[in-house]
């Protein structure tokens, strides 16, 4: 039971009352726990007289009961009042309870109020339109790439070829190590593809890893080309469709891929619209949320990571994410309150599962409806997928400081101007 006895600006003074029955129950539970774990010479475990327990632990028991009651009643009150606290340490001098008596106490809460949100109407959202034909062809091409086969060819290696090699041990003794590389994929390190590009079967060369230190202390490896295989993509026919997706014809495959692409696009568009709307709202409404909310969510995220001692970089990234999520929650809540979005008890009962509190469901429904309201009023534009198609939007991977270089028989790096044909000869 509680009663709000005073409301002044963002402060609320609340009087809580707990029944004598509940107070007595808490006393019994705590006393029983102490007795169970206590060992005193001359008494069996669990059989220590109550007078001894009261004499030694009486005030500790009272303080524990007061703490339990405070936390329980505060939690129940916050569940009903829909408040956001400015901090999680409310003021209040709490007298210790007495067994078999009703217990009352007052606490003062400071409430947090999110600044009234702006930028709710007319949010500009740019979404990519779907070029369905290109998307379907790209998907089918990816199927073909996964089903590629390789045929041996009698010519120097080219981009995309599979080159089979042997790494010959020092002194040409022992079994060579066999491996392969696909030219263009830098599978074993930067620079190795260039060493095998344009080479023929039987070519031998020396190479080592280098990091531009100039010390030439890294081991030199001897390689020999044993086979060159050209990639062969499967033909686009009904047999390919059967192998790729277990459908009867190429036409059926295209229909199935088109349906999948559209479904994936629709899901991605929903996410993109919501994300852009929320990001725009956050940008228009800078504010600092309660510190304890960010700290609590940060700790929750860190615990989910499962790392015993997360590093400083991880902690900072996690806190940044938590800050954004708390701000997102609070600003959407403020939009819902400003726009008088109503959530009925029936809405909550329909959405709620047994493990959830009504307050958490209220927050989720209210914020969801706030996003829907913003999107209803947004200015949504579809971008022409053809625009900017010719621009190179690829992101170059940063080059590693380690890379392969060819070396001559004397261990020196070969002349940079020597052609592939000269190296082979």
Image (tube, grey):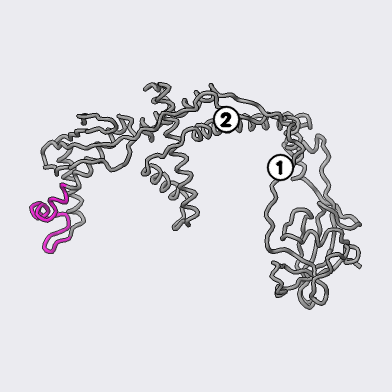
Could you tell me which secondary element the residue under label 2 belongs to?
Answer: helix
Task: Tell me which segment is drawn in magenta.
Answer: 39-62
Q: Tell me the tag on residue 393.
A: 1
Mark 1 near mark 2, Cβ–Cβ under 8 Å?
no
246 sits left or right of 55 in the view: right
Residue 95: x %, y % from top left: 14, 43
Q: Earlier in the sequence, mark 1 or mark 2?
A: 2
Residue 385: x %, y % from top left: 72, 31
386 sits left or right of 53 in the view: right
Could you tell me which secondary element the residue under label 1 belongs to?
Answer: loop
Q: Where 100 falls versus 80 (above or below)?
A: below
Q: Where 302 falls versus 270 (above or below)?
A: below
254 sits left or right of 286 in the view: right
Q: Where 253 falls versus 340 (above or below)?
A: below
42 drawn magenta: yes
Quadrant, the C terminus? bottom right
218 sits left or right of 106 in the view: right
Q: Which residue is mark 2?
A: 273
- Neighbourhood count class around disc 2 (C-alpha, 10 Å): few under 14, some 14–19, many 20 upward: some
Residue 410: x %, y % from top left: 82, 77
- Neighbourhood count class around disc 1 (C-alpha, 10 Å): few under 14, some 14–19, many 20 upward: few
């Amino acid at each position: 039971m509680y009663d709000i006895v005073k409301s002044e600006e963002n402060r609320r003074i609340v009087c809580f009352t707990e029944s004598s029955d509940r107070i007595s129950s808490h006393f019994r539970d705590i006393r029983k726990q102490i007795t169970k774990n206590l060992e005193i010479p001359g008494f069996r475990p669990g059989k220590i007289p109550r007078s001894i327990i009261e004499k030694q632990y009486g005030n500790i028991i009272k303080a524990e009961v007061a703490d339990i009651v405070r936390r329980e009643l505060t939690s129940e009150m916050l569940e009903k009042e829909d408040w956001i606290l400015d901090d999680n340490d409310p003021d209040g001098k709490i007298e210790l309870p007495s067994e078999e008596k009703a217990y009352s106490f007052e606490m003062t809460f400071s409430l947090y109020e999110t600044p009234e949100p702006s930028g709710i109407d007319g949010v500009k959202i740019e979404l990519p339109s779907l070029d369905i034909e290109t998307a379907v062809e790209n998907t089918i091409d990816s199927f073909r790439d996964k089903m590629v086969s390789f045929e041996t060819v009698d010519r120097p290696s080219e981009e995309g070829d599979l080159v089979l090699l042997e790494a010959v041990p020092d002194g040409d003794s022992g079994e060579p190590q066999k491996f392969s590389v696909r030219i263009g994929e830098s599978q074993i390190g930067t620079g190795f593809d260039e060493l095998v590009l344009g080479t023929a079967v039987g070519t031998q060369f020396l190479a080592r890893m280098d990091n531009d230190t100039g010390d030439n202390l890294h081991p030199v490896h001897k390689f020999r080309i044993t086979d060159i295989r050209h990639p062969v993509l499967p033909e686009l026919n009904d047999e390919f469709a059967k192998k790729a997706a277990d459908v009867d014809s190429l036409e059926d495959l295209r229909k199935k891929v088109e349906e999948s692409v559209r479904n994936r696009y629709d899901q991605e568009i929903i996410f993109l619209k919501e994300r852009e709307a929320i990001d725009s709202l956050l940008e228009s409404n800078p504010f600092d949320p309660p510190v304890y909310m960010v700290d609590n969510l940060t700790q929750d995220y860190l615990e989910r990571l499962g790392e015993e001692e997360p590093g400083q970089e991880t902690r900072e990234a996690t806190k940044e994410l938590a800050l954004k999520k708390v701000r997102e929650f609070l600003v959407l809540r403020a939009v819902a309150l400003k726009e008088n979005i109503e959530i009925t008890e029936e809405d909550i009962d329909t959405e709620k599962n047994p493990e959830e509190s009504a307050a958490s469901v209220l927050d989720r429904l209210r914020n969801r409806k706030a996003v829907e309201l913003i999107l209803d009023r947004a200015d949504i534009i579809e971008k022409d997928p053809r625009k900017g198609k010719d621009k190179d939007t690829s992101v170059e991977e940063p080059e590693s400081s380690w890379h392969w270089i060819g070396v001559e028989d004397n261990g020196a790096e070969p002349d940079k101007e020597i052609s592939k044909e000269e190296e082979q000869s």
